[in-house]
Amino acid sequence: MLPNNLVEVRKNHKFNLSSLNKWVDNHLENFENIIDIKQFVGGQSNPTFVLFF
């Protein structure tokens, strides 16, 4: 079950998904591409994301 406090990544926190996929692929074996990213609403000073594979 997913938390109900997930939203699309906020404009000022967006990053390049293709670049992230390339970086992770170079650092993890058997990596599957990230297909979606959501951002938690709330929290403290550090933005937190959920990656969907």
Image (cartoon, rainbow, N blue to C red):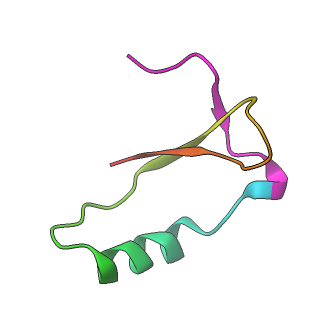
The picture places residue 34, in percent across and down from the top left corner, at 39, 56
- Residue at 25% across / 60% down in the picture? 32
> Closest to the observer: 8 or 29?
29
Indicate left or right for 46 with 25 as reference. Answer: right
Quadrant where the N terminus is found in the figure: top left
Please provide the residue range marked out in magenta: 1-12
Q: Position of residue 42 (x, y in %)?
A: 76, 29
Image-quadrant location for residue 13 = bottom right
Residue 39 relative to residue 2: left or right = right
Q: Position of residue 10 (x, y in %)?
A: 77, 46
Q: Quadrant of residue 26?
A: bottom left
5 in the magenta segment: yes
Judge whether 43 appears above or below 52 on screen.
Answer: above
Residue drawn at (66%, 65%), measured in percent from left and top?
15
In this view, which residue lies farthest toward the front? 44
Residue at image point 31% right, 79% down: 27
Residue farthest along the right direction in this orientation: 12
Residue 34, relative to residue 2: is it above or below?
below
Left or right of residue 7, residue 51 in this image:
left
Please indicate whether residue 38 sits to the left or right of residue 51 in the image: right
Residue at 18% x, 73% y is 29
Is residue 15 covered in magenta?
no
The tally of labels here is 0
Residue at the far bottom: name it: 26
